[in-house]
Each structure stands twice: as structure tokens, then as C-alpha cells.
Image: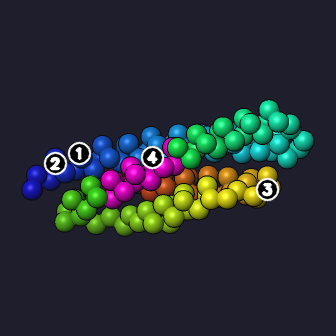
Amino acid sequence: MNYDKERREAIDAGNRALMSLRSAQSDLHSAKNWGIVDLLGGGLLTDLIKHSKMNNAQRHMEQAKWDLERFGRELSDVSGYVNFDFNTADFLSFADYFFDGLLADWMMQDRINKARNQVDEAIKRVEYILARL
């Protein structure tokens, strides 16, 4: 096995995951801001914009989920050389839960905040591992 090749593949996969996570992070930040406006009495337009941002965030989180799974597989190729503690299960299950049956605006705001925290944590983990690679 060629360690340098496997390491490069892991780095590329990690960078793709970071790109997806950062896109989700940006959309979630925007959705949070529009959610606050909506809670303060926004209107139909505010609600439409907020939902558009959430749809974008969902798309990016789904891509991030796939990218993180691939990153995990690539890391396993270099695990004989370096031990990484990278478990995407928490993020992946939360990404699925986040978009199931959003009930009310205030609950949505709480879920946006939780999703942002999960994305922020995933970004930190990926950046840490990439720095070690």
C-alpha cells in the first residue's frame, strides 16, 4: 500500500467534507437569522426565505453526510499508520433527524441552532484530522 497516495486521498476527501460542511454552516447561519426575523413577526416572504435557506442547508448537509462517510473510509486506509478517532455517527443521525417533521417556528429555531453546533463540531474534527495528515 502506498501511504502517500492513501494520505492524499484522505486529505482530498476531508477537504470535500469541509466544503460541504461550511456550505451547510453558512446556510444554517442565514436560516437562523431569518428565523429570528420570522419569530419577531416576519411575514410570508420571511417564511419563504427562511425555508429556502433551510432547504439549501439540507442539501449541503446531505452532501456533507456522504462526504463524511467517504472521509471515514479514506481514513481507514491510513489507519495502520495513524490512529484517528473519527466517528460521524452523531452528525449523520442528527442530519437525518433535523429535517424530519419540523413543527413550529420556535422548534425550528432550536433545531437550526443544534444543527449549526453539530456542523461546527464536524468542521473542527475534520480540520484537526487534516492538520495531522
Residue shown at the point (83%, 42%) measured from the top left: 38
Q: Secondary structure at mark 1?
A: helix
Say whether disc 3 or disc 4 marks the residue closer to the N-terminus: 4
Residue 44 seen in this snapshot = yes
Question: Where is mark 3, residue-wise?
Answer: 104
Q: Amino acid at mark 3?
A: Ala
Q: Classify 10 Å Cα crowding around label 4: few (below 14), some (14-19), many (20 and above).
A: some
Q: Nearer the viewer, mark 3 or mark 4?
A: 3
The mark that comes first in sequence, 2 or 3, is 2
Q: Are marks 2 and 4 in contact (CB under 8 Å)?
A: no
Q: Residue flagged by tag 4: what amino acid is it?
A: Gln
**Coordinates of residue 119 in the picture (x, y in percent):** 54, 53
Q: Which residue is mark 4?
A: 63
Query: Identity of the amino acid at label 1?
Result: Arg
Percent across and percent down for residue 51 are: 69, 41
Q: CA distance from mark 2 to mark 3?
A: 50 Å
Q: From which residue to which does the magenta span run?
A: 60-72
Is residue 62 inside the magenta stretch?
Answer: yes
**What residue is shown at x 75% (from left), y 58% (from top)?**
103
Q: Residues within 10 Å of mark 2 (few under 14, many from 20)?
A: few
Quadrant of residue 75 within the rendered picture: bottom left
